[in-house]
Image: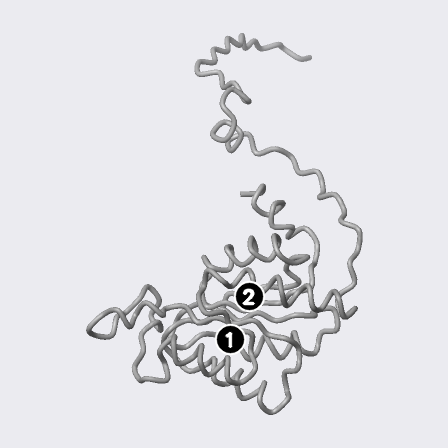
């Protein structure tokens, strides 16, 4: 809905670039970033297929080279090894910007056997593909990794505030969002009686013909 775009401040660029496996979770990231930072600079959901068209490292390397993107976020998940390519880039100094990360799927260890989650690629086929292994590896490499997903907003907030304090991110005056025409179908649902719809419409038109010379 358009009101979610306005609430998440997606009508102007922030300072945070993220890459997420999940499209649905990218909506949640937009919301979180609007609450604890100055918002999203660019966000990409690469999808959870086993063979995606682009990967985490493709976009994070772009963000690293973009001077207007000050802070990185990686939201991975159980299954696959793409997070390890980013880990290698951080270790060898290719990626230097602060990166907050989390791999979703830590609950998989509660099951007796490996679980296939919603995405085609969200299943661990080895120990290193588990969400816990990825989170531990990213933390060891210097990523900012919270202990739980619930703590992710706090990690984002702390990292953002450090960048503001150091002058890396300069605060600018918030601008008003553009005026957007109201979606009346949405208004009927969201606001009772905001729009009154005429159920019956009777139109009586008399058609005539006229001879022309």
Element at badge 2? strand
Residue 158 in picture, x, y percent from top left: 62, 65
**Which residue is found at the position 26% from the left and 69% from the top?**
110
Work out whether 194 lies above or below 94.
above
Relative to 184, 106 lies left or right: left
Image quadrant assignment for residue 40? bottom right
Residue 179 in picture, x, y percent from top left: 70, 38
| Rendered image: mark on residue 31 | none
| Rendered image: mark on residue 44 | 2
Work out whether 60 lies above or below 162.
below
Q: Name the residue at the bottom extreme.
A: 92
**Which residue is found at the position 53% from the left and 85% from the top?**
141
The residue labelled by disc 1 is 54
Q: Which is nearer the eye, 138 or 13?
A: 138
Work out whether 18 lies above or below 198.
below
Element at badge 1? loop
Work out whether 164 lies above or below 57.
above
Label 2–label 1 contact, CB within 8 A: yes
- The CA span between labels 2 and 1 is 10 Å
Relative to 65, 109 lies left or right: left
Q: Dividing the image into 4 quarters, which one contains the C terminus?
A: top right
Q: Which is nearer the eye, 55 or 35?
A: 35
Earlier-in-chain disc, 2 versus 1: 2
**Which residue is found at the position 54% from the left and 88% from the top?**
88
**Figure colour scheme:** one colour
């Amino acid at each position: 809905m358009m009101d979610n775009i306005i609430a998440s401040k997606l009508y102007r660029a922030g300072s945070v670039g993220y890459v997420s496996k999940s499209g649905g979770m990218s909506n949640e990231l937009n919301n979180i970033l609007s609450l604890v930072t100055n918002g999203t600079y660019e966000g990409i959901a690469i999808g959870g297929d086993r063979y995606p068209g682009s990967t985490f490292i493709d976009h994070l390397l772009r963000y690293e080279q973009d001077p207007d993107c000050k802070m990185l976020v990686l939201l991975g998940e159980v299954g696959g090894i793409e997070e390890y390519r980013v880990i290698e880039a951080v270790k060898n100094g290719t990626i230097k910007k602060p990166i907050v990360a989390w791999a979703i799927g830590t609950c998989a260890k509660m099951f007796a056997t490996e679980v296939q989650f919603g995405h085609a690629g969200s299943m661990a086929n080895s120990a290193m593909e588990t969400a816990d292994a990825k989170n531990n590896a990213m933390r060891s490499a210097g990523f900012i990794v919270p202990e739980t997903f619930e703590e992710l907003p706090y990690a984002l907030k702390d990292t953002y505030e450090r960048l503001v304090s150091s002058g890396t991110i300069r605060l600018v005056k918030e601008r008003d969002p553009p005026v957007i025409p109201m979606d009346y179908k949405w208004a009927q649902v969201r606001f009772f009686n905001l729009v009154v719809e005429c159920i019956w419409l009777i139109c009586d038109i008399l058609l005539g013909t006229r001879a022309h010379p």
